[in-house]
Amino acid sequence: MKEFMIRDIKFGDFEDLIDTYYSYYAEIKENPELGITLFRKMPSLGSEVDWFRDLYKEKLNGNRIAVVAEADGKVIGICEIARNRPGSEVDHIGRLGIAIRREYRSKGAGKMLMEEALRQSKGKFEQIILEVFEGNTAAIKLYEKMGFREYGSLKNAIKRSGKYIGHKLMYLEMGKAKE
């Protein structure tokens, strides 16, 4: 197992995160069933700056948890849990997203990222939900080990290169959040 450091996201992580995100566009050409949802066109650097600014702001506001995995001095993965519609009647729910650079998958980083993100979620969210590609059996097994349960599916959720991929919908009960 590789050695990873799991920590809160820092403002200086931007370049590593964008480099990792952009790498998925090359990877998807080789593996069209890659279990991450991408924009049809690779976003501009400017739009990625906006994404990171918003992520960081929401983290500072308490509406998002964002932890990263670092290996060899570089950020190689992220797990975030975003509050569902802050200020609404559904804001007790967090939506989990996770992504790990290809060469570091299946080495324990995903599990470590999720453990830390879920630890930080206690008292903030009452439920965590996620969507996972139906064919992504490794991710589904990990989510089930972490306590997530399926509550539905959405056929044809992703349309990629003229083909459809379904999503499994999963949730985890976290207990009552602090008011």
Image (cartoon, rainbow, N blue to C red):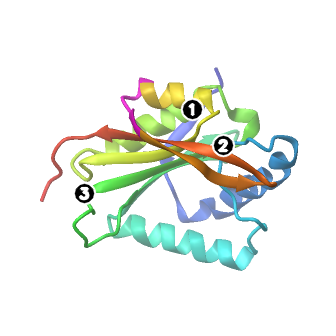
Q: Earlier in the sequence, mark 3 or mark 1?
A: 3
In the rendered structure, does residue 148 fall within the stretch colored magenta?
Answer: yes
Q: Is residue 32 visible?
A: yes
The x, y position of residue 105, in whole percent, is 67, 32
3 and 1 marks in contact (CB < 8 Å): no
Tag 1: amino acid: Ala
Tag 2: amino acid: Gly
**Number of marks:** 3
Q: Which residue is mark 2?
A: 35
At x 52%, y 59%, the residue is 10
At x 74%, y 74%, the residue is 45
2 and 3 marks in contact (CB < 8 Å): no
Q: Which residue is mark 1?
A: 139
Q: Is residue 26 above or below residue 14?
A: above
In the rendered structure, does residue 129 fall within the stretch colored magenta?
Answer: no
2 and 1 marks in contact (CB < 8 Å): yes
The x, y position of residue 79, in whole percent, is 51, 47
Q: Foreground: 101 or 143?
A: 143
Q: Which residue is mark 3?
A: 92
Q: Quadrant of residue 71?
A: top right
Q: Residues within 10 Å of mark 1 (few under 14, many from 20)?
A: some
State which region is magenta.
145-151
Q: Quadrant of residue 109?
A: top right
Q: CA distance from mark 3 to mark 1?
A: 24 Å
| Helix, strand or loop for disc 3 | loop
Tag 3: amino acid: His
Q: Earlier in the sequence, mark 2 or mark 3?
A: 2
**Quarter of the figure with the C terminus:** bottom left
Q: CA distance from mark 2 to mark 1?
A: 9 Å
| Helix, strand or loop for disc 1 | helix
Q: Is residue 74 visible?
A: no
